[in-house]
Image (cartoon, rainbow, N blue to C red):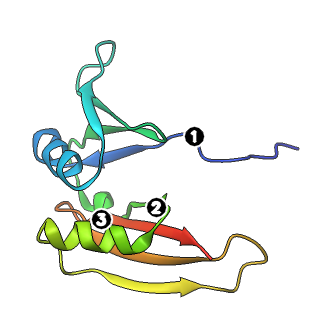
Amino acid sequence: MIQPKAIDHICLWVRSLAESRGYYETVFDLVCTERVDSPGTLVLESRHVHFFMQECRGDTACIEKQYLSFEVDRLSEVIVNLENAGIRDYTTGEVTFLKTRNYAWCEWKDPDGTRLECVERI
């Protein structure tokens, strides 16, 4: 049986690579580069994470159903950074029902409606 240790990466679908690139570079400490061997694909990476983005062709209803969560050291710093970026429509809470890895969270949506979350382990 496969026993996963962590999610290594994902690919988010977006309406506009240019708009999403600007948003993610501004809100997160991520470097965005176009993938040379896969035109139309962005690689977003930092020291700790990497993931991909592709522009959605056709029906974009699925975009708002996506959800991406990052683990961070201090949630309070995330909230300050969101407010400094003009993002005030966020919610916070705690997950305490797990056997391990409970966390405090802050959640908001990117311009495409993708749910973004940062969590701090408690």
What residue is at 28 percent from the left and 31 percent from the top?
42
Residue 64: which numbered mark, if any?
Answer: 3
Quadrant into which the C terminus falls: bottom right
Q: Label 1: which residue?
A: 8
What residue is at 21 percent from the left and 41 percent from the top?
57
On screen, residue 119 above or below 35: below
Instruction: Answer few, some or many: residues within 10 Å of disc 3's Cα (few below 14, many 20 plus, some between 14 and 19).
Output: some
Kind of residue at disc 3: Glu
Please state the horizontal and vertical placement of residue 107, each as a whole percent of the image: 36, 74
- Quarter residue 82 falls in: bottom left
Q: Nearer the viewer, residue 37 or 32?
A: 32
What whole-number distance in Å separates the C-alpha atoms at marks 1 and 3?
22 Å
- Quarter residue 30 falls in: top left
Q: Label 2: which residue?
A: 69
Q: Residue furthest right?
A: 1
Please state the horizontal and vertical placement of residue 86, each as a whole percent of the image: 11, 71
Q: Nearer the viewer, mark 3 or mark 2?
A: 2
First in sequence, mark 3 or 2: give its number: 3
